[in-house]
Image (cartoon, rainbow, N blue to C red):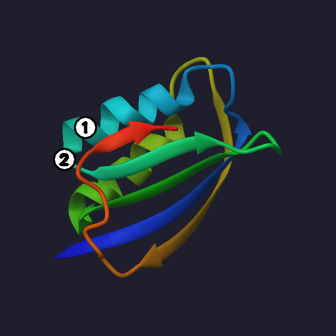
Amino acid sequence: MEIGVHIIVRGFVQGVGFRYFVLRQASRLGVNGFAQNLMNGDVEIEAEGDRSMVEELIKELKVGPRSAHVADLKIEWKEFKNRFKDFHVR
């Protein structure tokens, strides 16, 4: 089953390669969407794909790259709309 998700990642997640970490993990898992920095220091992620792969991506986000510190994830599940052709960094 395919699903969409909107995620806000809070913590020390900007200036540490976090968005590119998300890009690598999402591409490896076949998840499409984007990651972008927000003005408040958080990272926003929109992702779509097979539910099990999206859940695996979320597990990876909770850990993040070594240089980051993830304090919290705000996760909002959404209907799959096939809006993305790949995963990219904004």
Identify the secondary structure beneath mark 1. Answer: helix
Identify the secondary structure beneath mark 2. Answer: loop
In this picture, residue 56 sits left or right of residue 50: right
87 up-or-down from 84: above or below: above
- Crowd band around label 1 with a 10 angstrom C-alpha radius: few (<14), some (14–19), many (20+): some
For mark 1, what is the residue?
Answer: 27
Amino acid type assigned to the residue bearing label 1 in the image: Ser
At 51% from the left edge and 37% from the top edge, which residue is drawn? 63
Q: Position of residue 11 (x, y in %)?
A: 74, 40
- Crowd band around label 2 with a 10 angstrom C-alpha radius: few (<14), some (14–19), many (20+): some
Q: Position of residue 45 (x, y in %)?
A: 51, 52
Q: Quadrant of residue 73?
A: bottom right
At 72% from the left edge and 45% from the top edge, which residue is drawn? 38
Q: What is the spatial separation of the Cα atoms under label 2 and label 1, in whole angstroms?
A: 5 Å
Instruction: Report how many numbered discs are placed on residues in the image.
Output: 2
At 21% from the left edge and 36% from the top edge, which residue is drawn? 28
- For the N terminus, the image quarter is bottom left
At 33% from the left edge and 29% from the top edge, which residue is drawn? 24
Q: Position of residue 80 (x, y in %)?
A: 30, 76
83 up-or-down from 38: above or below: below
Which residue lies most toward the bottom here?
79
For mark 2, what is the residue?
Answer: 30
User: Circles 2 and 1: CB distance less than 8 Å?
Assistant: yes
The foreground one among 45 and 63 is 45
Q: Quadrant of residue 69?
A: top right
Q: Position of residue 89 (x, y in %)?
A: 46, 35
Q: Quadrant of residue 78?
A: bottom left
